[in-house]
């Protein structure tokens, strides 16, 4: 509806449009305030989505990819403390030596103090426990090592665990008695390369 406003002298001023309900239109100030509210809501929505994505990326690790083990810290020690007790076997965090073991396949167990430093540096270690021998398991693990590359990946015998196979990363432990190649590959892809220095 159009209305004409007359000034005090009887002359015509500007025309003003009102909505169908007869209410006044928004003033510029009201329009700006409304736009600012929508902008604020939009920014909050975007930040919420970004935050959720980051939280999922860093915290939403798949529970099928092993057990989360309590972090024992990452102190670098010149000598191993006597009678130190790890909270998992193989260890997944804790005090460790200043040096790391070479990446790749080892025919003997890497000292646990070195293993932990390798894990801190973003490494993943595949362990097998076969005192009586298990050449088929070792060969399959070796194939994984070769297919994925040995950088930040170790294969070693380790007899101080209950399961036949274990895969470790910093604060993560995946155990199995029957080799599941896909699960091991997923674990390596998920955790390899994540630096844990603080």
Image (cartoon, rainbow, N blue to C red):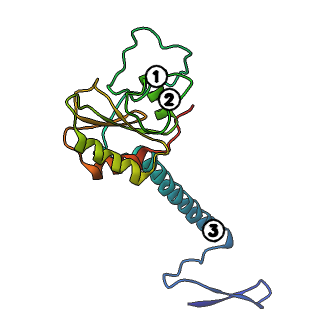
- In the image, is residue 139 above or below residue 49? above
Front residue of this view, candidates 121 and 39? 121
Q: Position of residue 90 (x, y in %)?
A: 34, 27
Residue contact between numbered discs 2 and 1, judged by CB atoms under 8 Å: yes
Mark 1: secondary structure: helix
Say which of marks 1 and 3 sits in front: 1
Q: Residues within 10 Å of mark 1 (few under 14, many from 20)?
A: many
- In the image, is residue 176 above or below residue 132? below
Query: How far apart, in angstroms, are the residues tagged by discs 3 and 2?
Result: 61 Å
Report the residue at 65% width, 73% height from top.
27
Q: Which residue lies under the disc numbered 3? A: 30
Front residue of this view, candidates 164 and 122? 164
Q: Which residue lies under the disc numbered 1? A: 113
Q: Residues within 10 Å of mark 2 (few under 14, many from 20)?
A: many
Looking at the figure, which quarter contains the N terminus?
A: bottom right
Front residue of this view, candidates 14 and 94? 94
Q: Residues within 10 Å of mark 3 (few under 14, many from 20)?
A: few
- Say the numbered circle drawn on residue 117: 2
Q: Quadrant of residue 84?
A: top left
Q: Position of residue 163 (x, y in %)?
A: 22, 32
Query: How far apart, in angstroms, are the residues tagged by discs 1 and 3?
Result: 67 Å
């Amino acid at each position: 509806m159009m209305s004409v406003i007359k000034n005090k002298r009887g002359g015509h001023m500007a025309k003003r449009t009102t909505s169908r309900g007869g209410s006044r239109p928004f003033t510029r100030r009201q329009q700006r305030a409304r736009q600012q509210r929508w902008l604020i809501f939009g920014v909050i929505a975007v930040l919420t989505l970004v935050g959720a994505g980051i939280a999922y990326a860093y915290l939403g690790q798949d529970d099928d990819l092993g057990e989360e083990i309590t972090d024992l810290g990452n102190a670098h020690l010149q000598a191993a403390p006597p009678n130190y007790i790890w909270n998992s076997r193989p260890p997944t965090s804790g005090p460790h030596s200043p040096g790391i073991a070479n990446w790749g396949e080892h025919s003997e167990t890497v000292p646990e103090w070195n293993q932990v430093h390798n894990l801190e540096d973003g490494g993943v270690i595949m362990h097998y426990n076969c005192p009586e021998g298990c050449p088929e398991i070792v060969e399959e693990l070796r194939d994984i090592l070769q297919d994925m590359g040995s950088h930040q990946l170790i294969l070693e015998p380790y007899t101080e665990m209950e399961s036949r196979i274990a895969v470790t990363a910093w604060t993560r432990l995946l155990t199995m008695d029957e080799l599941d190649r896909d699960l091991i590959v997923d674990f390596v892809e998920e955790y390899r390369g994540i630096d844990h220095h603080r």
